[in-house]
Amino acid sequence: MKLNGTSIIGGARALAGERKFRAFNPVADRALEPDYFSATPEDVERAARLAAAAFENYAHVSVQRRRDFLHDLAARLEQAGPAIVERANWETALPVPRLQSELGRTCFQLRLYADLAAEGAWLDARIDHADPQRQPVPKPDVRSMLRPLGPVAVFGASNFPLAYSVAGGDTASALAAGNPVIVKAHPAHPGTSELVGLTVQQAVKHAGLPEGVFSLLFDGGTEIGTALVSHPLVKAVGFTGSRRGGRALMDLAAARPEPIPVYAEMGSVNPVFILPEAMEQRGGEIAAGLHASVTLGVGQFCTNPGLVFTLSGAATDRFLLRLAALIAHTAPGPMLTPGICRNYGLGVARLAQTGGVSALARGETGPTGCSGGAALFRATAHSFAADNSLMEEVFGPATVAIECGSREELLAAARSLEGQLTASVHGTEADLAAHRELLAILETKAGRLVFNGFPTGVEVCPAMVHGGPYPATSDGRSTSVGGRALARFARPVAYQNFPDAALPDELKESNPLGLWRLVDGRLAQPATTAG
């Protein structure tokens, strides 16, 4: 597939506009060809109208056909994988093995969400039969299920050019739930986005679906994203990025004449709590694991552990010495973009200048303006309580160890935390028994609790929760990974006293799709055919 740098509007390509930009290779420190042309307001209008027209058909496409479409898309991405991975490596400096793994995850997500959509439990189908004899008034027949919202705008993420971008989790879950998607590509990896976008376009055509099921818009700035979220035909937004960016989209969507939901993942410091017995018994092992988690991918994960809480003592001192030695000997790595690297440097400098914070170790400085070195800082619980800036995410391979002088200080620190994607606890059974209150607090603070492990790495499975209370996400009741991801882009609809023939198959009395349903308040198993 040849790159030409123009947006994909349904089954066609947009004309080249006046505004243009290029991708940047962080290792070679140079711009990459070709030029990418920012979409125009007219492109947004056309994409939105095509998506709205497609929704009338796609929302009612059979679950089997939708599943076949997404499975075919996954197979096509695997076939195009070598070219996609090569371009992504040029644009992001992420290692080829990491990108191959990410492509595998992307395809797995597509298949998982397709299968979950076809299986149908996510629809939460409910049937309450009529009771005409009920007194004092007859009871009507009421049936309900989740139905898709309409065209969804998805914003590609900088740090996951595949798994959270054009065909990533938000796109996969929105398509699986029956919604057309308009993707605003991230300007850091437009070539990768174009290759994936062309693959999606081919899959849409092969499936015989309306062309407006998918469009891809390029923009080097924020104008097109703003126009997309503001468009009255767009009904929901998926976003992974900074708090500033997510908050701007939330405010924009709320200010519309018809406000729409924004599902924004906006970062997290992912606190790690190391309890006394675990620290005494395996502090060195925990230090090695924490170091690997902090520096994985040059720290460019939304689940990077940015705060570590410990109780003061000799075991903690040994732990910090070990962790500092590992950090100091960590080689720098190329970061995704010059802007991300610059912001990381500013964040590290801010920590170094914060009162009550001391630098324990700084990794080496890299050879280019896109290289990021690891950093470890130390502060007391008192300093943490006095300065809210220590809760701010520093996107990169840095972490801050917070030493607490007592169990009470540890609990107070946990209570003061903002909403997080994750919270991790290292402990023994005795530690857990002695710190039950800590676990109860963390349950209110994070979407995923990790025991004796580290938060980097999000398993794609039906039970996963990748979300959390604000400001980790815009809506802590949702998740961008796992089976519940589909429900973000749907709403409940009830059908009262409808004749059976007019009901969706999911709600018909005969249950032709064989779904698990809640019937008259009891979970009903689908009927099986003997023999």
Image: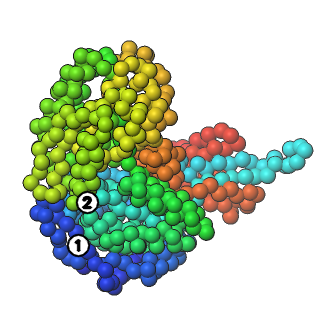
Q: Secondary structure at mark 1?
A: strand
Along the line of sight, which residue is nearer the eye, 381 or 19?
381
Residue toward you, 326 or 292: 326
Find residue 360 and report its image quarter: top left
Point out residue 454 in the picture as x, y percentages from the top left corner. Answer: 30, 34
Name the mark nearer the viewer: 2 or 1: 2
Q: Which residue is mark 2?
A: 339
Specify the amino acid type for callout 2.
Answer: Gly
Left or right of 451: which side holds 175?
right
* Residue at point 23%, 56% (across, down): 342
Q: Which residue corresponds to the image point at 58% horizontal and 48% vertical from the top-left?
A: 124
Between 99 and 506, the one nearer to me in the picture: 99
Q: Amino acid at mark 1?
A: Arg
Task: Residue 74: name its quadrant.
Answer: bottom left
Residue 474 image position (x, y, % from top left): 49, 51
- What's the mark number on residue 22? 1
Towards the viewer: 509 or 227: 227
Can you say whether 11 is above or below 229 in the image?
Answer: below
